[in-house]
C-alpha cells in the first residue's frame, strides 16, 4: 500500500470504531475551550476536566478572569502541572482579549497565536472545535500514529501536520484528528503496544511502500 491507500484504509477503520467523535475537553464556548486546551499541555484531558469546573465557577469570561489574581488561578490549576506559567498565560491572554478583541476569542490563526500561551496546536483546536474552520491539530498521539502507519516520516508535529493535510480531504480534518486521538489511546498507545493486535497497525504496516 502507498501512503494514500494507507490513509484511506485508516479512515475506514476509524469511521467504524469512532463514527461520531466529540472533543474530550469539557467547555461552554470558545473562551472556556481556549483555557481548557491551554491547561491540557502536558496534562491529561481527564484531569483538566476535573479542574476546569472549579476554575470556571469563579471565572468563565475574560472579564471575570482578570479580576482574579494569577496566584489564585495558579492554586486552582496546580494539579494540571506548569501552574505558574499557565496561570500567567491565562491571566494575560484574558487581558489581551479584552484590550484587543472586545473580550471575544479571535477567529484567525494569526490572532490566536499572538495570545500568551497559545501555540499552533492550541490555535488549531480552537479554530476546529469552536469555529469549525478546517484545521488538523497534531498532538503526540497523532504524531505517533502517523509514523507507525507510514503516513509521515516527519520528525516534528509541524511536518506531520503538513503530511496528513495532504493525505486526508480538508472536510475530514476536524473529525479525523479526534478519531486518531481516541484510537491512539485505546489501540495504539506509546507503551505496551502490540502491532499485531492493533486494528490499523496490523493492516497498514505489513507492506509499507512509498
Image (cartoon, rainbow, N blue to C red):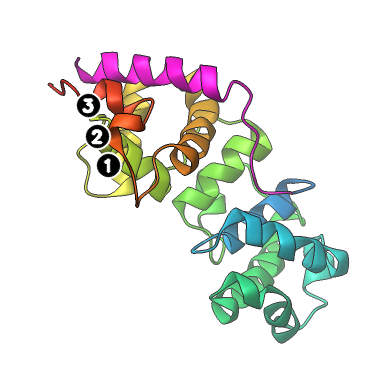
Q: For the point 51% across and 43% down, which residue is it?
A: 124
Reading the image, the residue beneath label 2 is 152
**Left or right of 140 in this view: 128:** right
* Nearest to N terminus: mark 3 or mark 2: 2
The CA span between labels 3 and 2 is 13 Å
**Left or right of 160 in this view: 135:** right
Span shown in magenta: 1-26
Q: For the point 65% across and 54% down, which residue is it?
A: 34
Residue 86 pos. (x, y %):
58, 72
Residue 30 in sight: yes
Residue 171 pos. (x, y %):
51, 19
The CA span between labels 3 and 1 is 21 Å
* Nearest to N terminus: mark 2 or mark 1: 2
Front residue (pair 67, 52): 52
Residue 35 in sight: no
Residue 152 pos. (x, y %):
24, 34
- Confirm whether the magenta stretch covers residue 17: yes
Q: For the point 47% across and 49% down, which residue is it?
A: 121
Reading the image, the residue beneath label 3 is 205
The CA span between labels 2 and 1 is 8 Å
Amino acid at each position: 500500500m502507498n501512503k494514500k491507500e494507507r490513509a484511506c484504509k485508516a479512515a475506514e477503520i476509524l469511521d467504524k470504531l469512532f463514527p461520531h467523535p466529540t472533543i474530550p475537553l469539557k467547555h461552554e464556548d470558545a473562551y472556556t475551550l481556549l483555557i481548557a486546551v491551554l491547561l491540557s499541555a502536558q496534562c491529561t484531558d481527564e484531569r483538566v476536566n476535573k479542574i476546569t469546573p472549579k476554575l470556571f465557577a469563579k471565572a468563565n469570561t475574560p472579564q471575570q478572569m482578570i479580576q482574579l489574581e494569577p496566584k489564585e488561578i495558579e492554586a486552582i490549576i496546580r494539579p494540571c502541572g506548569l501552574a505558574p506559567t499557565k496561570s500567567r498565560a491565562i491571566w494575560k491572554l484574558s487581558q489581551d482579549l479584552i484590550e484587543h478583541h472586545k473580550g471575544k476569542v479571535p477567529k484567525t490563526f494569526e490572532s490566536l497565536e499572538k495570545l500568551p500561551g497559545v501555540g499552533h496546536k492550541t490555535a488549531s483546536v480552537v479554530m476546529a472545535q469552536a469555529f469549525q474552520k478546517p484545521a488538523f491539530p497534531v498532538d503526540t498521539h497523532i504524531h505517533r500514529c502517523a509514523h507507525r502507519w507510514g503516513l509521515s516520516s516527519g520528525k516534528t508535529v509541524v511536518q506531520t501536520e503538513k503530511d496528513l493535510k495532504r493525505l486526508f480531504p480538508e472536510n475530514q480534518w476536524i473529525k479525523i484528528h479526534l478519531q486518531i486521538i481516541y484510537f491512539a489511546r485505546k489501540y495504539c498507545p506509546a507503551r505496551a503496544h502490540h502491532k499485531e493486535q492493533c486494528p490499523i497497525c496490523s493492516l497498514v504496516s505489513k507492506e509499507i511502500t512509498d
